[in-house]
């Protein structure tokens, strides 16, 4: 054997590939990392879902406190400008009739469903300022309307809620079905509650107050 070949053999002498045990350890570590990332994402989604439920509960509590304090619903209050400093009356709907009127997704300042937020905030019962619709934990908004998806006045809704959070909230708080009960949801943007929750779908979720 030539010197050249012998030197080449010596160059690779002592080098070896991974054993099956080493490869197994690497795969286990990768699996643990992936599992940790997925679990972390699940925990974040659950935390956002819990915050959404808290926001809905807080909105309902604020409306009830306003009603208890002033005898009328915020937004529908016919004397809001005397009850709360700086408040303005809604210019649409029938004031003082016990119904917060207006579309659930309205941004018209004069609507009762929008003016409501100003009344609550000026009364010190809700965070924020003005009539802007509050944002929920998933980047959508929290809204109110008199009726939606077959449930009636008042109805608190949240938009852009992921499938997992919508189904979890419905299961924890109601019957787990988007079509029935006190919590209903629409993922088709057709203004009707869906028959079932579907993975990958984003929902508008509404709850009876």
Image (cartoon, helix red, strand yellow):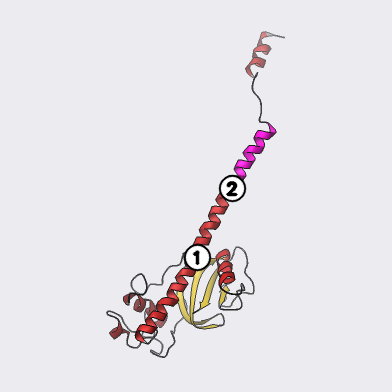
Task: Indicate the secondary structure of the residue bearing disc 2.
Answer: helix
For the residue carrying disc 2, how many other residues have a C-alpha within 10 Å: few (<14), some (14-19), or many (20+)? few
Determine whether 180 is above or below 24 in the image.
Answer: below
Residue depicted at 33% across the width and 74% down the height = 124
Residue depicted at 45% across the width and 67% down the height = 136
Residue 130 appears in which quarter of the rendering? Answer: bottom left
- Seen from the viewer's position, the closer of residues 209 and 163 is 209
Residue depicted at 53% across the width and 57% down the height = 43
Q: Are marks 1 and 2 in contact (CB under 8 Å)?
A: no
> Residue 171: x percent and y percent?
59, 70
> Residue 4: x percent and y percent?
66, 11
Magenta residues, start to end: 14-35
Determine whether 206 is above or below 136 in the image.
Answer: below
Judged left or right of residue 81, residue 201 is right
- Seen from the viewer's position, the closer of residues 32 and 75 is 32
* Main secondary structure along the magenta-highlighted residues: helix
Query: Does the magenta-highlighted stretch encompass residue 169?
Result: no
Residue labelled with disc 1:
50
Residue labelled with disc 2:
34
For the residue carrying disc 1, how many other residues have a C-alpha within 10 Å: few (<14), some (14-19), or many (20+)? some
**Placement of the N terminus among the 4 image quadrants:** top right
């Amino acid at each position: 054997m030539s010197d050249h070949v012998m030197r080449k053999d010596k160059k690779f002498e002592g080098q070896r590939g991974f054993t099956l045990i080493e490869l197994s350890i690497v795969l286990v570590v990768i699996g643990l990392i992936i599992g940790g990332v997925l679990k972390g994402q699940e925990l974040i989604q659950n935390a956002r879902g819990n915050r959404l439920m808290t926001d809905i509960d807080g909105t309902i509590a604020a409306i009830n406190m306003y009603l208890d304090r002033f005898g009328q619903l915020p937004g529908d209050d016919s004397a809001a400008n005397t009850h709360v400093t700086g408040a303005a009356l809604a210019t649409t709907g029938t004031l003082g009739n016990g119904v917060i009127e207006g579309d659930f997704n309205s941004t018209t300042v004069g609507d009762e469903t929008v003016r409501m937020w100003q009344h609550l905030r000026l009364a010190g019962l809700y965070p924020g300022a003005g009539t802007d619709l509050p944002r929920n934990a998933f980047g959508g908004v929290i809204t109110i309307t008199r009726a939606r998806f077959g449930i009636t006045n008042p109805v608190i809704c949240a938009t852009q809620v992921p499938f997992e959070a919508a189904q979890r909230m419905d299961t924890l708080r109601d019957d787990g079905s988007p079509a029935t009960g006190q919590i209903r949801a629409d993922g088709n943007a057709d203004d009707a509650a869906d028959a079932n929750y579907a993975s990958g779908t984003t929902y508008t979720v509404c709850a009876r107050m």
